[in-house]
Amino acid sequence: MAFTEAERTDLRRHCGYPAYGIGAQGFQGWRFYQTYGMLEFRLQHLSGSEEAVARSYLATLAALEAAIPATGATLDTAQAAVWRRNENELAERLRMFDDWRRRLCGFLGVPPGPALGEAGLRMVV
């Protein structure tokens, strides 16, 4: 079963690639970025079992991403009774989230996109 548009959007986003829009038009899209084209090709041509693995990555990443904003609830408390806030929680959660995003890129066989801090896009002229 093919990915839904929402799943493809999340896969692109988690891999660190920018919004695709309604398709390749003008100077954007796979025609100008080889790695983006490879990502789009892979998303459209995965086997059923590979799609299942990608969907499990999406579920894991959704849970990890949802936990990041929740760390803000305890930023104002360093210690309450015996409970003490982990001062590194936000950084640790972001690191773990980005690690899983890179694992997804590795599974899909594409370099991490620019939103993951690596130059994964190359201009083709």
Image (tube, grey):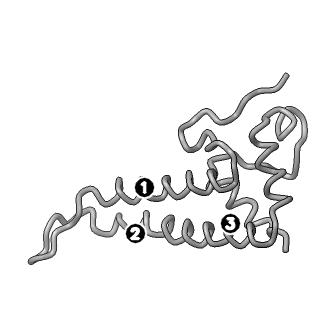
Label 1 crowd bin: few (<14), some (14–19), many (20+), radius 10 Å:
some
**Horizontal and vertical percent position of residue 24:** 88, 43
Task: Name the kind of residue labelled 2 in the image.
Answer: Ala
Question: Which quadrant is the C terminus positioned in?
Answer: top right
Q: Quickly name the residue at label 1.
A: 94
**Horizontal and vertical percent position of residue 109:** 69, 49
Q: Vertical placement of 13 versus 35: above or below?
A: below
Q: For the image shown, how many numbered marks are present on the structure?
A: 3
Question: Which quadrant is the N terminus positioned in?
Answer: bottom right
Badge 1 marks a residue whose secondary structure is: helix
Q: Quickly name the residue at label 2.
A: 70
Kindly identify the residue that appears in the image at 43 percent across and 63 percent down: 68
Task: Name the kind of residue labelled 3 in the image.
Answer: Ala
Badge 2 marks a residue whose secondary structure is: helix
Kindly identify the residue that appears in the image at 55 percent across and 70 percent down: 60
Which of the two labelled residues, at mark 1 and mark 2, occupies the earlier sequence position?
A: 2
Label 3 crowd bin: few (<14), some (14–19), many (20+), radius 10 Å:
many
Kindly identify the residue that appears in the image at 35 percent across and 56 percent down: 92
Q: Do the residues labelled 1 and 2 touch (CB within 8 Å)?
A: no
Please state if 72 lies on the left or on the right of 51 as rendered. left
Q: Quickly name the residue at label 3.
A: 54
Q: What's the CA distance linking mark 1 and mark 3? A: 20 Å
